[in-house]
Amino acid sequence: MSIDQHPPTPVEAPPEGPASEGSAPDDPGPAPSMTAGQWARLGVVLGLLVLLTATTGAWGLVMVLGIVVMITLHELGHFVMAKRAGMKVTEFFLGFGPRVWSIQRGETEYGLKLVPAGAYVKIVGMHNIEEVDPADEALTYRQKPFWARIGVAVAGSTVHFLLALGLIFILLAGVGLPAGTLTPDEDQWRVEGVEQGTPAFAAGLRDGDDVVALDGRPTPTFESLREVVYDRPGDEVALTVERDGRTFETTATLAPHEADPAVGFLGVGQTVPEERLGVLAAVPATFREFGNITRESTVGLARVFSPSRLSDFGSQVANARDEPAAVDEPDRPVRPSAASSADEPESSEENRLLSLLGVFRLGVGLGDTGGVAGVLLLFALMNVFIGLFNLLPMLPFDGGHVAIAVYERFQERRRHLSQRYFADVGRLLPMTYAVVGALALLFASTLYLDIASPLTVN
């Protein structure tokens, strides 16, 4: 990063005495009572949470609270590191917008604001263009040593990475993941949803069976079974089935699918059993999976902002209402990918960027279909991605403050300075405004896309 510089900013000497002088006293006095307006705002927040739960179910509430807690812990990381470094923190709020409730503790005001979309912490003197009371200058972020500033800047992303590690460990050792996630063996699916009157029921299939082969053709995946069944309505097929450790043969006459008589119908769904690791085995596996997710997220982040992906995203937004996201209907036969890849275009939904609304809907869908494991895995992925995204070396991201601190350190070493060197942050403001504008445009376009063409979990 190249920044044109001014000479080091002159700083008035702080008053004599310990660094804590000039701060508000630790005794907060009596807690302030809430006004009628604040009670009304609190009622609005609680009412919205109740309405959310009523309309989206428990998973909707889990997603909102999970996102709020995740972002709050991010800011708590900055807060704790700033306090440990002796910096002055004047505000720590959950939410944005009008103040609902707050209380003063020492130099910091803690509170709740109306819009529960995250949290923020206000540290005094983050850069050289911020005006600060001379009595507080020694307590500013900009006056602290290099490693203290780096520690505060990376604390938020560090919290996200620690959360991801914790969630991955819980998934591996506690909740469990679908079999095959942790091992390369693809033969992991089992029969589910066998109903009376179907060819599968007549053939003696039951929930939990493992269909090993159909007419001697191995069926290691549900998709491979469906591929064989698809084009054979009315045919009699031989099934090789495993149940409770024993293997047996049976036959079934495939029925025509009610939605399309040209499509074969066996009448089975699939389930994937869960597998868990022991606590000791889960520790190295956690770091291994974290490394895999981090690597894939880094590559994905680079691809998202490549010209081709941005062009693809622009097309998605422009055609959102004309080409809504495809949704698989439960009662409609779906041609297996192996049989349809030649005549169907590749879906661009894997390139899809999601707004907060899209992530919320995805989480609710995963909760309904995948339960706790699906939601925990989503939050693990979100924490890794947000942690990496926040380290982009541009303001207003945390990585921008890291880049400035590193640049200042480099200049101090290069020039053999005996005093602090301050980057001229004012010269970065146009770029910062451009980044904020791009983020606002990205937010608006992804929100529009998620409203006009919402994704669903099949």
Image: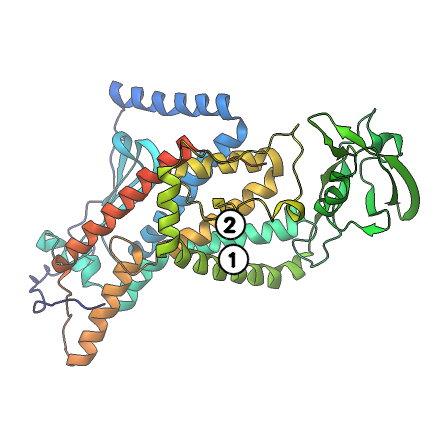
Find the distance from the CA under tag 1 to the CA under tag 2.
9 Å
Q: How is the image coloured?
A: rainbow
**Residue 152, position as x, y percentages in the image:** 31, 58
Task: Report the disc number at residue 15.
Answer: none
Residue toward you, 196 or 8: 196
| 380 displayed left or right of 422 | right
| 50 displayed left or right of 135 | right
Amino acid carrying label 1: it is: Ile
Q: Quadrant of residue 359?
A: top left
Q: Secondary structure at mark 2?
A: helix
Instruction: Note whether 261 is above or below 277 in the view shown.
Output: above
Asked whether the viewer can see residue 157, the reply is no
Residue at left offset 93%, top offset 45%? 248
N-terminal-most mark, 1 or 2 = 1
Instruction: Note whether 406 is above or below 248 in the view shown.
Output: below
**Which residue is identified by label 2?**
380
Residue at left offset 83%, top offset 24%? 197
Asked whether the viewer can see residue 47, the reply is yes
Residue toward you, 330 or 217: 217
| 240 displayed left or right of 20 | right
Q: Nearer the viewer, mark 1 or mark 2?
A: 1
**Residue 203, position as x, y percentages in the image:** 89, 34
Question: In the rendered picture of this protein, how many numbered marks are placed on residues?
Answer: 2
Crowd around label 1: few <14 · some 14–19 · many ≥20 (10 Å): some
> Is the residue under label 2 in contact with that under label 1 (CB below 8 Å)?
yes
**Residue 47, position as x, y percentages in the image:** 40, 20
Q: Quadrant of residue 24?
A: top left
**Residue 283, position as x, y percentages in the image:** 61, 61
Residue at left offset 29%, top offset 61%? 393
**Which residue is identified by label 1?**
293
